[in-house]
Image: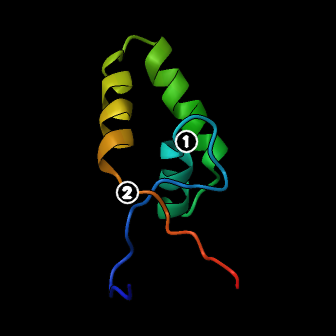
Amino acid sequence: MNTPYKQLTRSTSNRMIAGVCAGLGEYLGIDPTIVRLLTLLAFFTGFGGIAIVYLIMALVVPEQPTTQSQ
């Protein structure tokens, strides 16, 4: 699917749990490890709603399409 805009997808190759942080890192053009660290920091510093946001994104954001070689 060719789209004129960049689409947010969950990563299938660089995932730890559901691929949300890796997908955000790829979308924003930064290292996914930074996104993971910021997510953990937000979770442990009292912003517990980040866990709910992560779960919702894991359900709503589509997975990155896989390329099949024949």
Q: Give the mark toward the camera: 1 or 2.
A: 2
The amino acid marked with disc number 1 is: Val
Point out residue 34 in the picture as x, y percentages from the top left corner.
61, 42
* Residue density around tag 2, few if under 14, some if 14–19, many if 20 or more, within 10 Å: some
Q: On the rendered image, what quadrant is the C terminus found in? A: bottom right
Q: On the rendered image, what quadrant is the N terminus found in? A: bottom left
At 34% across and 52% down in the image, what residue appears?
61
Point out residue 29 in the picture as x, y percentages from the top left corner.
55, 64
At 54% across and 45% down in the image, what residue appears?
19
Q: Is 21 located above or below residue 48 in the figure? A: below
Point out residue 18 in the picture as x, y percentages from the top left corner.
51, 40
Classify mark 2: helix, strand or loop: loop
Indicate which disc residue 35 carries. 1
How is the protein colored in the picture?
rainbow
* Residue density around tag 1, few if under 14, some if 14–19, many if 20 or more, within 10 Å: some
At 37% across and 69% down in the image, what residue appears?
7
At 62% across and 45% down in the image, what residue appears?
15
**Residue at image mark 2:** 62
- Residue 63: image quadrant is bottom left
Q: Is 52 located above or below residue 63 in the figure? A: above
The amino acid marked with disc number 2 is: Pro
Indicate which disc residue 57 carries. none
Point out residue 28 in the picture as x, y percentages from the top left corner.
48, 60
Along the polypeptide, which appears first: circle 1 or circle 2? 1
Classify mark 1: helix, strand or loop: helix
Residue located farthest toward the front when viewing the structure as drawn: 70
